[in-house]
Image (cartoon, rainbow, N blue to C red):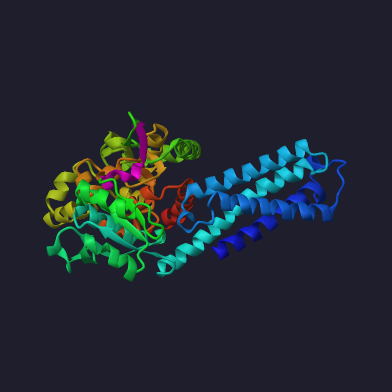
Amino acid sequence: MIGVFCVDVLMLAIAMGLAYWLRFASATAFFQSDALIQPELYLWFSVGLTVLLLAAFWIYRLYTWRRLFRGAREFSAIFHSSLSVLSLVALYQFFSENLLIARGWLGLAVLLSMLFAMLGRVLMRSRLARLRRRGHLTLPTVLIGTNDEAAVLAEQLALGSESGLKLIGFLTDDPSKVGQTLAEQPVLGVVSDLDDLVQQQGLMEVVIASSALRRDAILKLYRQYGNSAQVSLRLSSGLFEILTTGLQVQEFAHVPLIGVNRTRLNAPQRLMKTLLDVSVAATVLLVLSPLLLILAIVVKLDSKGPVIYRRRVVGLNGKEFDAFKIRTMHVNGDEILAQHPELQAELAANHKLKNDPRITTFGDALRKYSIDELPQLFNVLLGQMSLVGPRMISPAELEKYGRWALNLQTVRPGLTGLWQVSGRSDLTYDDRVRLDMFYIRNYSIWQDISILLNTIPVVLFGKGAY
């Protein structure tokens, strides 16, 4: 807490100084006026405004451990607390004849304070993530339940070490499972042992796999720990496989009911992603249109068959569509593959062949540099694909994703993605699935831009492509 507070003080001090410079010392014509420049006075104004902002941060619980570094909610709290301070000071200035503050400085000071406070939290998050990956500053956590849902939850918590929850084991309602291992974690005891764990292990987080316990058992746990100051009790939805889309809670007849969003992204995220997709895809197609024409001619001369190959794939919400690619295989590819049973087995296992006899001479070069995928920019403009997203897969391949199949259908498949910049075809199939799930769960527009930039050197050097 002290570290976060000190970073906030530092960031607010920088913001106040920058606001003073922009308002009174810079050559920005917009801020030039006849206002008196009084450094000593504005130093005290800065101190007072900083104190008000820090107090507002405290009121909005920005120094509460359990609410620290909790994603967009933390930024929302910084925004609303800063706006509250600005409104309070402006209102006081309106009714007071003694408080004469340049409005330009006040507005800049609060705006920059908000931005710098957010920046400070981002830097602290990065530092905290590194510490948590090393096992520091984590909250001891036990998972109640030993069914399939509990095992999946444990696996996800193990992957998300940056969340701050450190799973130490399971509790069960089946005494015969005590002492066994589930998802590489021990079953420590039965549910009635929870009191002892809280005292002995300093337990701070309890996660209940709701499908693992009876309703009366869950209610009993909430009566015991629902209002505990030491332990946070959390309940899974029982539908972990579709949680990537997010949930909505709405009351009907005073009964809170959970609804599942159809897509992973909210409205602002969809808008930003669409703008990025359309602008980049349209620009690239316009610039590369002469190259596409030349490629079409060469493909026709290289081998018999159409220039464009249509691959049937699964898109958003499970809707199928044809993904466009420049044809890189001979039209009698199935006959050629039939002559190589060992390659058929490799294809069935990995959906990729390192040495594929069906590929044409020119097609090998197109694949190495992913040039064959350029026509998918039209799929992007049609709204069927995105520039960045999980791998596009066939309907038959969807079964290989198992419980993650529903997650895959909550976003559009991508022309490139995390898998593309992490090894491409050199990755195992399980690694590709894991990377797709990580991308879906951790989407941000900044991650998309980063992946796009990292794709350029990967494609230019043809690393991991076949």
Residue 399 point in image, percent of width and height: 19, 46
Q: Residue at x 83, y 56 (%)?
A: 40
Q: Can residue 454 be seen in this snapshot?
A: yes
Res. 356 in view = no
Which part of the image, by quadrant, shows the C terminus? bottom left
Indicate the position of residue 256 as horizontal and vertical percent values: 33, 36
Task: Answer left or right for 73 relative to 235.
Answer: right
In front here: 288 or 32?
A: 32
Say which of 60 and 281 sits in front.
60
Side (left or right) of 118 relative to 327: right
Of residues 209 and 267, the one nearer the viewer is 209
Quadrant containing the N terminus in the rendered view: bottom right
**Which residue reaches farthest front?**
223
Left/right of residue 254 with respect to residue 107 in the rendered view: left
Looking at the image, residue 386 lies above or below residue 58 = above
Residue 264 location (% of width, % of height): 37, 41
The residue depicted at 50 percent of the width and 56 percent of the height is 64
Residue 313, position as x, y percentages in the image: 27, 39
| Magenta stretch contains residue 64 | no
Q: Does residue 450 sit above or below 310 in this rendering?
A: below
Tell me the magenta residue range: 239-251
Q: How many marks?
A: 0
Q: Quadrant of residue 31?
A: top right
Q: Is residue 466 left or right of residue 277?
A: left
